[in-house]
Amino acid sequence: MDKLEVLKRWVAESSRIVFFGGAGVSTESGIPDFRGVDGLYRQKFEFPPERIISHSFYEADPAYFYRFYREKMLPLGFEPNITHQVLARWEREGKLSAVVTQNIDGLHQKAGSQRVYELHGSVLRNYCRRCRRFYPAEFIRDSEGIPTCQCGGMVKPDVVLYEERLDAQVMEDSVRAIRQADLLIVAGTSLTVYPAAGMVEYYPGDRMVLINRDTTPYDHRAQLVFHEGLGDVFSRL
């Protein structure tokens, strides 16, 4: 039996699927990743992107941060792709228990997924650092310079910058879901960014599927490995 047929059978037999995804899930919707051939890390800026989106840079030069953020990190107007859609369908069918994502674009929810744990936050949530008033992503997009609340405070995207800790509750919920999964699908991630990448270690089962165009440090850990695009695999499920 070929790998795809095995995966189809595992999906049919599962009721607690957990999907752990990275940037490769959204690139097929047109959103560039960080480390790919055309990713942000291969583009030329006055400062390295990983420095610009660090907490210390945000504090030191918020005007430059927001100029970069609006141009390169505010993925509005994109639509869910086949992977997002299949996962949402599995959840409706009672087969998928959670999506754990490193992405900040909100496309899983846009496709209809309800149980989504966003390890790195979301561009769709923005809060005043002074009064905690909520602002949508469009407020950041349409503002000039440093986005400012009506109270005078700075409005910050609810995304995890370098040097910032992941939300403890999101981490706890993600780990619980992975531990209880009867099928873990890890897709579109290089599994090199920690602590997120290390979360797959919490999976105790023997049905781990890894889908990524390139090899990862966890290929040996998976029972099924597809070095293909996600759309190529999910369009056949």
Image (tube, rainbow, N blue to C red):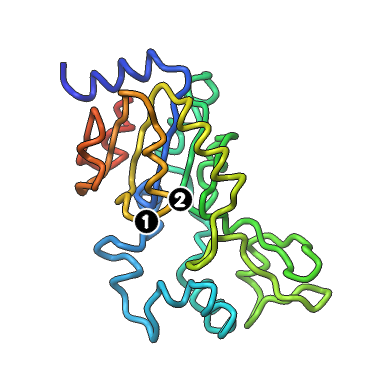
Q: Amino acid at mark 2?
A: Gln
Residue 113 higher or lower than 162, as above or below: above
Q: Earlier in the sequence, mark 1 or mark 2?
A: 2
Q: Are marks 1 and 2 in contact (CB under 8 Å)?
A: yes
Residue 119 percent location from the top left of the image? 51, 50
- CA gap between label 1 and label 2 equals 10 Å
Which numbered mark, 1 or 2, is in the foreground of this view? 1
Tag 1 residue = 193
Residue 152 percent location from the top left of the image? 80, 78
Mark 1 is surrounded, within 10 Å at the Cα level, by few (under 14), some (14 to 19) or many (20 or more) other residues, namely few
Q: Is residue 32 left or right of residue 157?
A: left
Q: SS for tag 2?
A: loop
Residue 24 higher or lower than 221, as above or below: below
Tag 2 residue = 102
From the viewer's side, name the closer residue of 63 and 89.
63
Residue occupying the point 16% across, 16% down: 1
Q: Residue furthest left?
A: 1
From the viewer's side, name the closer residue of 227 and 218.
218
Residue 225 higher or lower than 70, as above or below: above
